[in-house]
């Protein structure tokens, strides 16, 4: 029992000695750090550019080279601020640049920047490289461009879209550099993929914005995609053939006199479709040389039908005189 107690006492003393040693070691480390940080150091670091007061009708074209290498002298504590926070240097485009053709030019001396005092007290600016920066700019162009839909839609058997697909809005406004915007003819949506569709469609779809779009502004980045869907059926009507551009000195006999027109329409509109909604003509000027054949064409069809086709592709004729 006495031996055990003696062992515990010795262990406690050793642990206290170890704790005291670690405390002294930590204190020495802290003193060393404070000593180092209190000294002045000279070093060069990169500063990003923050552009302010850029004219509204101008846009600065992105350029990753817009960066300063700045040589500073200050004590270690202030250096910590630059290492933990990405430093920036502001350039005021209202009074610190001048125009040279399609370029803004910034050129300032070290003494000017020191007078402006963009750095904290106790920080000395020794050098800046480069001392001149060139910012290419372009005049903003405002252009309205249509939205182009990309779809991959599969309907349930017997179903289809009643009218054309629609988008809200059907076009967007783009603002950006003239040389970029003037080449934009349309903006495409992301692919709309739907399967087994049998009800009306209403989807919010993102636009495929250009990859290099940081210089561009868009009135919207998504559109509403709508479609009325209904049950469809096939219909058939017999339509008389009209022959056009027949020379006055020629008389022909052609057969058959009428063709069947097949179409696809919604059940709601089926009973409203009548033969007079269609016209089929054969243009004699388009007749095949050395063949007594005319080509029938559908020249009129109602808007509420789709997949319109004829049962015949050729009409035979004979010249009577």
Image: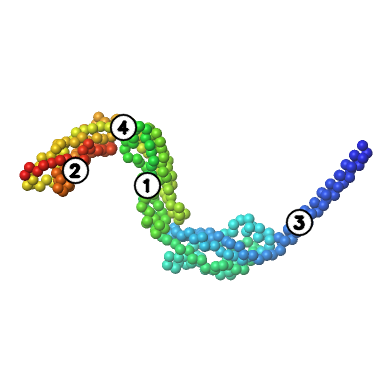
Q: Earlier in the sequence, mark 2 or mark 1?
A: 1
Q: Nearer the viewer, residue 270 or 20?
A: 270
For marks 1 and 4 on the same chain, the one whose residue lies earlier in the sequence:
1
Which residue does the image show at 62% across and 59% down from the upper left?
A: 82
Upstream in the sequence, badge 4 or badge 2? Answer: 4
The reply to whether dot 2 and dot 3 touch (C-beta < 8 Å) is no
Q: Which mark is residue 96?
A: none
Residue 295 numbered mark, or none: 2
The first of marks 2 and 3 along the sequence is 3
The reply to whether discs 1 and 4 touch (Cβ–Cβ < 8 Å) is no
Q: Is residue 66 left or right of residue 316?
A: right
Between tags 1 and 4, which lies in front?
Answer: 4
- Farthest right residue in view: 2
Q: Is residue 46 visible?
A: yes
- Asked whether the residues under the numbered discs 2 and 1 touch, taking CB atoms below 8 Å apart as contact, a structural biologist would say no
Which quadrant, please, contains the N terminus?
top right
Q: Which mark is residue 147?
A: 1
Mark 4 highlights which residue? 232
């Amino acid at each position: 029992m006495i031996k055990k107690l003696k062992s515990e006492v010795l262990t406690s003393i050793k642990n206290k000695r170890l704790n005291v040693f670690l405390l002294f070691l930590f204190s020495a480390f802290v003193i060393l750090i404070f000593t180092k940080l209190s000294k002045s150091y000279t070093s060069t670091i990169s500063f990003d550019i923050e552009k302010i007061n850029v004219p509204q009708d101008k846009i600065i074209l992105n350029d990753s080279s817009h960066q300063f290498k700045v040589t500073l002298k200050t004590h270690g504590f202030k250096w910590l601020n630059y290492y933990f926070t990405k430093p920036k240097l502001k350039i005021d485009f209202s009074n610190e640049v001048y125009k040279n053709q399609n370029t803004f030019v910034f050129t300032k001396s070290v003494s000017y920047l020191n007078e402006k005092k963009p750095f904290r007290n106790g920080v000395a600016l020794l050098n800046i490289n480069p001392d001149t920066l060139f910012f290419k700019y372009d005049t903003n162009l405002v252009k309205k461009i249509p939205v182009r839909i990309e779809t991959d839609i599969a309907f349930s058997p017997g179903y289809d879209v009643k009218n054309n697909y629609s988008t809200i809005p059907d076009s967007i406004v783009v603002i950006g550099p003239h040389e970029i915007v003037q080449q934009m003819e349309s903006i495409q949506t992301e692919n709309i993929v739907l399967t087994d569709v049998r009800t009306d469609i209403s989807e919010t779809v993102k636009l495929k914005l250009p990859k290099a779009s940081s210089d561009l502004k868009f009135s919207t980045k998504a559109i509403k995609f709508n479609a009325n869907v209904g049950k469809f059926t096939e219909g058939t009507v017999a339509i008389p053939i009209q022959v056009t551009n027949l020379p006055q000195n020629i008389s022909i006999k052609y057969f058959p006199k009428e063709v069947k027109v097949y179409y696809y329409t919604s059940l709601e509109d089926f009973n409203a479709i009548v033969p007079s909604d269609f016209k089929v003509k054969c243009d004699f000027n388009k007749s095949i040389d050395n063949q007594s054949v005319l080509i029938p064409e559908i020249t009129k069809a109602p808007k509420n039908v789709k997949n319109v086709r004829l049962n015949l592709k050729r009409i035979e004729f004979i010249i009577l005189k």
